[in-house]
């Protein structure tokens, strides 16, 4: 039975000796006839219109040929010259050989040119050369990429980078303003999830036209790009040849804010006032207490690992609403606000960046410690003692950062009472916590009076910072 053949034709990359596609196909038909093959399909690659740069990149008919071979729909391929199947930046002998191999074809009767069958030996050599060429190409590409990165050349991606014109020569002002807005909201404790929801509601467009997702927004905010920094394989390698939208300091702070929480990790906050309320009896911090049936409260907790007296409890909703009214009322008052903002400004500056740097140093010390321990250079007791010390240092720094962030949060809140209450509700628990922390000293909660079940604002000792 005659072997089923595919004819494959395409324009030669080098123009010399190039035969027209029609002449190629005619010659292949004659060859098939001579070799007693049954031509079942003629695959003619459309001439490339995109010129040299894209040559050979997409050869849809070649892909079709590979599929037909793999699926056993054709037994062999007839082509005009062997160079029709070689790479030139595109697919070539190696995938072809793999396809014949997959289909279990006889390699000596797999490829024919107008000169007759191409031997298994020649196919083997050509495919090896192909692989070598392909490896060289990818090595060269890697070198080029590395050099571009070092020189701060923008990464060439298929899609325009948010905030920038396609060629990176300029900033898109409205998008840059949104990046800046998102950065400040994240540093004020708002979740990226909340910001995405807000932007989608406001109809803020993305580059693709699809809705905002946490992943999209996070990757923009964490990118070195927005700070004018060129990254390569996940690390900043140079100053980019394009304008920055945010400062490098701010971006460092974003990295910390958006980093997955540390191992010792706090869970996401669900009670905004945890850490801001103290027991009126024993002065220990009040903790959250959830009851079955949904009753939430803050309570002084006693028991294993808890230092409280267990004598104070207050209904959460009542105290949260009361604190909201006070905080929003303070901020709606222009004079109070002016004082608070000036306090905030005093604590700002580049302190944030040095704290971030300090935090990084602690984390690398922690890593080194793990190495020392796993290599047996220090024993477990010393390891644990050192780790605990480092964690305590890190927590102190994080607390200071939270304080600075609390000051920063003030710069970016609405001015009216109604606007403030709306922001309080919409921006969520972390925002509520930071705002309260920025405005009020820890609130002491006194024991309940006779009306135990109702919220009693007189139990709260509120002490404004300004
Ligand atoms: Zn107590």
Image (cartoon, grey):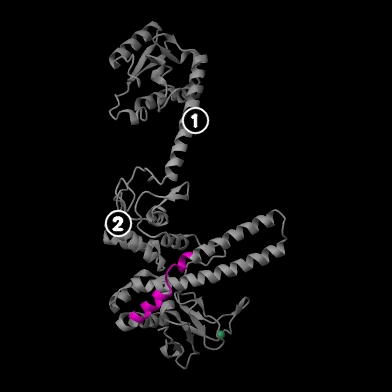
On whether residue 350 falls in the magenta region, the answer is yes
Q: Depth check: 282 or 19 in front?
A: 19
Decide: is 150 above or below 174. above
Decide: is 189 above or below 90. below
The quarter in which the C terminus is drawn is bottom left
The quarter in which the N terminus is drawn is top left
Q: Depth check: 345 or 184 in front?
A: 345
- Crowdedness near tag 1: few (<14), some (14–19) or many (≥20) residues, C-alpha within 10 Å: few
Mark number, residue 135 = 1
Residue placed furthest toward the top: 34
Secondary element under disc 2, as helix, strand or loop, is helix
Question: In this picture, which residue range is highlighted in magenta?
Answer: 338-353
Q: Give the x, y percent position of residue 22.
A: 28, 15
Residue at mark 2: 175
Alpha-carbon span between mark 1 and mark 2:
40 Å
Splitting the image into four quadrants, where does ligand 1 fall?
bottom right
Residue 70 occupies which quadrant of the picture? Answer: top left
Q: Give the x, y percent position of residue 170.
A: 29, 51
- At x 44%, y 72%, the residue is 404
- At x 58%, y 69%, the residue is 393
- Crowdedness near tag 2: few (<14), some (14–19) or many (≥20) residues, C-alpha within 10 Å: some
- At x 48%, y 86%, the residue is 445
Q: Could one spot residue 432 in this view of the protein?
A: no
Decide: is 37 above or below 240. above
Number of marks drawn:
2
Residue 47 occupies which quadrant of the picture? Answer: top left
Mark number, residue 51 = none
Q: Main secondary structure of the magenta part?
A: helix
Q: Give the x, y percent position of residue 111.
A: 44, 15
Left or right of 210 on screen, residue 302: right
């Amino acid at each position: 039975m005659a072997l089923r053949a595919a004819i494959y034709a395409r324009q030669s990359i080098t123009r010399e000796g190039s035969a027209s596609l029609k002449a190629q196909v005619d010659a292949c038909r004659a060859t098939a006839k001579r070799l007693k093959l049954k031509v079942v399909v003629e695959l003619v690659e459309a001439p490339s219109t995109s010129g040299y740069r894209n040559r050979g990149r997409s050869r849809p008919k070649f892909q079709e040929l590979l599929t037909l071979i793999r699926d056993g729909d054709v037994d062999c391929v007839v082509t005009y010259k062997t160079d029709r199947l070689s790479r030139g930046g595109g697919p070539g002998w190696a995938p072809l050989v793999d396809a014949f191999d997959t289909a279990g074809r006889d390699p000596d009767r797999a490829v024919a040119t107008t000169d007759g069958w191409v031997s298994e030996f020649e196919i083997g050599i050509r495919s090896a050369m192909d692989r070598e060429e392909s490896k060289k190409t990818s090595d060269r590409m890697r070198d080029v990429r590395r050099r571009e990165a070092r020189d701060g050349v923008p990464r060439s991606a298929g899609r325009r980078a948010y905030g920038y014109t396609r060629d990176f020569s300029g900033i898109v002002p409205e998008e840059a303003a949104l990046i800046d807005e998102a950065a400040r909201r994240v540093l004020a404790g708002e979740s990226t999830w909340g910001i995405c929801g807000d932007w989608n509601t406001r109809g803020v467009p993305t580059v693709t036209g699809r809705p905002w997702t946490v992943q999209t927004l996070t990757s923009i905010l964490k990118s070195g790009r927005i700070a004018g920094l060129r990254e390569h394989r996940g690390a900043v390698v140079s100053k980019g040849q394009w304008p920055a939208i945010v400062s490098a300091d701010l971006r460092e702070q974003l990295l910390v804010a958006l980093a997955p929480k540390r191992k010792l990790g706090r869970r996401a906050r669900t009670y905004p006032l945890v850490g801001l309320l103290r027991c009126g009896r024993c002065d220990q911090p009040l903790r959250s207490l959830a009851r079955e049936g949904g009753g939430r409260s803050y309570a002084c907790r006693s028991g294993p690992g808890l230092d409280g007296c267990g004598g104070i409890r207050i209904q959460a909703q009542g105290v949260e609403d009361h604190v909201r009214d006070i905080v929003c009322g303070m901020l709606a008052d222009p004079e109070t606000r002016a004082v608070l903002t000036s306090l905030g400004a005093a604590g700002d500056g580049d302190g944030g960046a040095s704290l971030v740097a300090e935090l990084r140093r602690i984390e690398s010390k922690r890593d080194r410690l793990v190495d020392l321990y796993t290599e047996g250079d220090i024993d477990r007791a010393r390891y644990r003692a050192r780790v605990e010390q480092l964690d305590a240092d890190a927590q102190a720094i994080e607390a200071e950062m939270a304080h600075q962030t609390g000051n920063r949060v003030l710069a970016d809140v609405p001015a009216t009472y109604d606007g403030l209450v709306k922001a309080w509700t919409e921006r969520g628990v972390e925002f509520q916590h930071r705002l309260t922390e920025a405005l009020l000293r820890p609130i002491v909660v006194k024991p309940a009076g006779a009306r135990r079940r109702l919220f009693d604002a007189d139990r709260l000792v509120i002490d404004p910072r300004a």
